[in-house]
């Protein structure tokens, strides 16, 4: 079964945004930066969510492994720069070898995991598409034939003529 490319793009965008945020915080700490403040984390979440939305909005443009690695790298650079700009203490923006190695390794690992998640999603959706029709086959409802008496509107007129003197009237106080 063919999977809608927009749903795969949404998964890819969410993963790229989340990985960008997590790896940015980890690499920031590895580079000697202090723990980010709440406002810095809030801004990081907004920025990385925006990166994820941009990835999700271009389903065909980011589907290849090279483009996926490129947007992961871009997301991490943007995220790490956000943390650097909002740092409460001054530290150099020098890209240390440890930080570059952490970013490069995380790009490779994250790209592989995201591609695996997309493949698993395709298989799961295909399996569900094959199983659901078996479990939920709709049987036509049983409709009994309508029997008419041939009298027309007479039963309605009988009810209207009966008035309120039948058993449905309020009780009479004695």
Image (cartoon, rainbow, N blue to C red):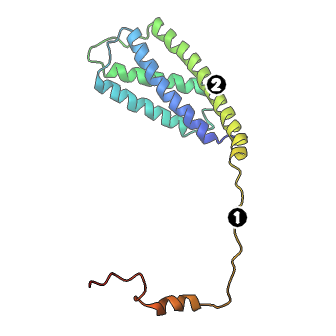
Q: Where does the image place residue 140, in percent across and percent down from the top left? A: 71, 60
Q: Residue at x 71, y 51 (%)?
A: 137
Q: Is residue 34 left or right of residue 30?
A: left
Residue 115 x %, y %: 63, 26
Quarter of the C terminus within the rendering:
bottom left
Residue lying at the far front in this picture: please name it: 174
Question: Which residue in the protein does label 1 denote?
Answer: 142
In the visual, does 39 lie left or right of 22? left
Would you call the spot at circle 2 few (<14 residues within 10 Å), some (14-19), or many (20 or more)?
few
Residue sticking out furthest to the top: 97
Which comes sooner in the sequence, label 2 or label 1?
A: 2
Judging depth in this view, the residue of 51 and 117 nearest the camera is: 117
Q: Which residue is mark 2?
A: 116
Q: Nearer the viewer, residue 27 or 100?
A: 27
Residue at the (31%, 22%) spot, across then down: 86
Mark 2, secondary structure of its residue: helix
Residue 75: x %, y % from top left:
48, 26
Give residue 113's quadrant in the image.
top right
Tag 1 secondary structure: loop
Residue visible at 60% across and 41% down in the picture:
6
Image quarter of residue 69:
top right
Question: In the rendered view of the protein, which quadrant contains the N terminus?
Answer: top right
Q: Residues within 10 Å of mark 1 (few under 14, many from 20)?
A: few
Tag 2 and tag 1, C-beta contact below 8 Å: no
């Amino acid at each position: 079964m063919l999977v809608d490319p927009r749903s795969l793009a949404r998964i890819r965008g969410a993963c790229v945004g989340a990985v960008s945020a997590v790896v940015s915080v980890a690499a920031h700490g590895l580079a000697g930066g202090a723990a980010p403040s709440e406002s810095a984390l809030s801004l990081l979440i907004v920025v990385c969510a925006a990166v994820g939305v941009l990835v999700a909005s271009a389903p065909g443009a980011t589907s290849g492994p090279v483009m996926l690695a490129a947007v992961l790298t871009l997301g991490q650079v943007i995220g790490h720069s956000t943390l650097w700009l909002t740092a409460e203490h001054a530290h150099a923006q020098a890209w240390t070898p440890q930080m570059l190695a952490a970013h490069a390794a995380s790009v490779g690992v994250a790209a592989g995991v995201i591609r695996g998640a997309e493949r698993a999603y395709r298989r799961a959706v295909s399996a569900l598409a094959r199983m659901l029709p078996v479990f939920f086959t709709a049987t036509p409802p049983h409709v009994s034939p309508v029997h008419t008496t041939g009298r027309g509107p007479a039963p309605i007129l009988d009810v209207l003529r009966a008035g309120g003197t039948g058993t449905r009237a309020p009780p009479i106080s004695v």
